[in-house]
């Protein structure tokens, strides 16, 4: 139900992104008036960077399609239906890694799950593991190396559990005596 | 099925591309101006440097992919991996810009607790990750 209500939000965000890009271009325009040489160098560096990341973005897109093909919102709802035990924590970790989507799409979805009884700890675990994004792993390896990527992924998953435990304790509303 | 998956992926891409391009534009401009200052901002302090990195990451926004690209470029500018790691961790785990939205759907206590813990974790993970990497590189 709530999914239908948020259908228009991506459009809003997208126009926000374009606005941000235009603001960046205006900043360049202003900078060009003050120091043309530096601005030209910065823009040349930007173009070089974009050229360099185009093939990486294509790989990312391919992985995103694969993930979206096999891991749908309906499935995550089904998995989070099982609320108790170690399994639910494992589902939260795996879902966090596999589900993609911007926060303004995910928060309403998670809000709905919370209303249906999903624990704060699992929500926190899910959100923390969004940092281990399989489609983005090639980019991380490209910039930081395989060793760094493996270590980071390990720490993110390990700390997500601690994160869940702490958030559950802190976010719990105080009981009235 | 595949059409839907492509559509959904494209939607995420379409939303994040202008933001990514905008951030990269600004980063490149700032780099040209600030590259002589990085040495003064980041003094090599094992706690202050990642703290600055985490603060910068917390107020930034965009998909994690953008943070990797920005972080990679900052690394090329000579900024330490410790700072960049705290930066990319805070970028994707602490959402100052998204905090009102998170609080609206998931509750104020949840949003503030989660973001506060994530901020501290981004510094701890950065220190641990670099320490671990150094151990493995030393072997």
Image (cartoon, coloured by chain):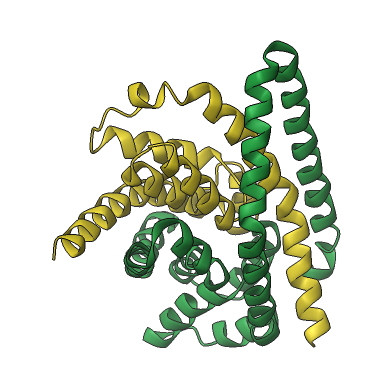
Chain colours: A green, B yellow
Q: In which quadrant will I find the C terminus of chain A?
A: bottom left
Q: Residue A75: which quarter of the image?
A: bottom right
In the image, residue B26 lies at what x, y percent? 63, 33
Residue B113: in sight, yes or no? no
Q: Residue B54: which quarter of the image?
A: top left
Query: In this rendering, is residue A125 above or below A87?
Result: above
Instruction: State the residue in front, A87 or B81.
Output: B81
Q: Residue at x 58, y 69 (%)?
A: A114
Instruction: State the residue in front, B56 or B113.
Output: B56
Left or right of B129: which side holds B37?
right
Query: In this rendering, is residue B26 above or below A66?
Result: above
Q: Residue at x 23, y 38 (%)?
A: B46
Instruction: State the residue in front, A7 or A120.
Output: A7
In the image, residue A86 lies at what x, y percent? 37, 85
Left or right of A24: which side holds B64?
left
What is the total number of numbered labels drawn onto the structure image?
A: 0
Query: In this rendering, is residue B21 above or below B129?
Result: above
In the image, residue B96 lies at what x, y percent? 55, 42
Residue reaching furthest to the left:
B139
Q: Residue at x 44, y 64 (%)?
A: A141
In the image, residue B105 lies at what x, y percent? 64, 57
Query: In this rendering, is residue A18 above or below B52?
Result: below
Left or right of A73: which side holds B137?
left
Q: In which quadrant will I find the N terminus of chain A?
A: bottom right
Residue A151: in sight, yes or no? yes
Instruction: State the residue in front, B77 or A123.
Output: B77
């Amino acid at each position: 139900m709530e999914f239908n209500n948020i259908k228009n939000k991506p459009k809003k965000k997208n126009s926000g992104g374009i606005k941000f890009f235009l603001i960046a271009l205006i900043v360049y325009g202003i900078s060009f008036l003050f120091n043309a040489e530096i601005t030209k160098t910065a823009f040349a560096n930007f173009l070089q960077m974009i050229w360099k990341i185009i093939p990486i973005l294509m790989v990312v897109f391919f992985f995103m399609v694969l993930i979206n093909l096999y891991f749908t919102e309906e499935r995550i709802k089904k998995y989070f239906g099982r609320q108790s035990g170690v399994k639910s924590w494992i589902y939260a970790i795996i879902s966090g890694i596999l589900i993609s989507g911007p926060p303004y799409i995910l928060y309403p979805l998670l809000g709905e799950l919370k209303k249906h009884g999903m624990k704060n700890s699992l929500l926190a675990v899910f959100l923390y593991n969004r940092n281990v994004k399989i489609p983005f792993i090639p980019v991380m390896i490209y910039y930081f190396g395989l060793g760094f990527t493996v270590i980071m992924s390990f720490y993110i998953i390990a700390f997500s559990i601690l994160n869940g435990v702490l958030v559950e304790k802190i976010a719990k509303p105080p009981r009235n005596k | 099925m595949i059409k839907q998956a492509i559509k959904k992926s494209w939607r995420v891409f379409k939303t994040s591309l202008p933001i990514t391009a905008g951030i990269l534009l600004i980063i490149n401009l700032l780099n040209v101006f600030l590259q002589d200052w990085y040495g003064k901002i980041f003094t090599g302090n094992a706690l202050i440097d990642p703290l600055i990195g985490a603060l910068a990451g917390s107020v930034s926004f965009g998909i994690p992919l953008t943070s990797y690209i920005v972080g990679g470029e900052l690394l090329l500018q000579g900024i330490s991996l410790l700072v960049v790691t705290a930066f990319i961790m805070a970028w994707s785990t602490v959402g100052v810009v998204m905090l009102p939205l998170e609080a609206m759907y998931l509750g104020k206590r949840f949003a503030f607790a989660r973001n506060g813990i994530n901020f501290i974790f981004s510094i701890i993970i950065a220190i641990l990750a670099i320490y671990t990497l150094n151990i493995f590189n030393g072997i």
